[in-house]
Image (tube, rainbow, N blue to C red):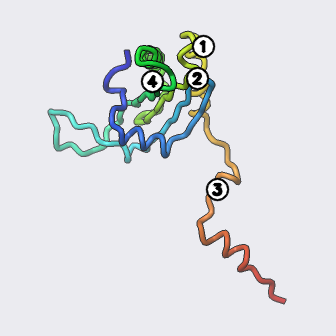
Amino acid sequence: MLSPRNRIRRSAEFGLVMRKGRRAGRDALTVVLLVQPLSETAPVRTPASPASSSPVAEQPRVGFIVSKAVGGAVVRKRVQRKLRHLMRDRVAELPTGSLLVVRAKPASAILGHDALAAQLDGALASVQRPRRPSAQRGRVPRGAASASAGGEQSIQ
């Protein structure tokens, strides 16, 4: 079983990951990874040192989304348990302080353990692969696109 320290439980964290994370999808599941710099992660406070505010490296945390489209309550719980069991061995491969959401699709209910593991491994490898630079990824500020198009005049 996946340790409770490695679980995402708050709705705000799920929302943050789903909005800002990097996605990779397969037939049976989609994974969304948000790697946070050490300065953005919440400091871990121990009972011995409640006043400690220095950032401490957090363990990666994982959350699961299994909607009613997957099946009834028994089927959803079975899929969630399979995914939790699979992630237990893979959580150590995630970057420190990262947040990962695994979203099950309806096909995950009919897949066996090995097929689900293969799809999870493929999605995790894809989402952790470094991005290659692309001209399409660069964002242009709102006013810059229209100003550069109409604002250029040749001086003769």
Q: Which residue in the structure is indicated by mark 3?
A: 138
Q: Position of residue 95 (x, y in %)?
A: 47, 33
Real-space CA distance between mark 1 and mark 4, rounded to the nearest whole angstrom? 19 Å
Residue assigned mark 4: 91
The mark closer to the camera, 3 or 2, is 2
Q: CA distance from mark 3 to mark 2?
A: 31 Å
Where, by quadrant of the figure, is residue 46 drawn?
Answer: top left
Q: Which numbered disc, 1 or 2, marks the residue that appears first in the sequence?
A: 2
Measure the alpha-carbon separation of dots 3 and 4. 31 Å
| Type of the residue with mark 1 | Ala
Residue 51 placement, left or right of 2: left
Which amino acid type corresponds to the residue marked 4 in the rendered image?
Val
Callout 1–callout 4 Cβ contact below 8 Å = no
Give the position of the C terminus as an image quadrant: bottom right
- What is the C-alpha distance between the residues marked 2 and 4? 19 Å
Q: For mark 4, does the 10 Å Cα neighbourhood hold few (<14), some (14 to 19), or many (20 or more) residues?
A: many
Q: For the residue marked with disc 3, what is the amino acid?
A: Gly
Q: Badges 1 and 2: C-beta atoms under 8 Å apart?
A: yes
Q: Residue at x 60, y 20 (%)?
A: 119
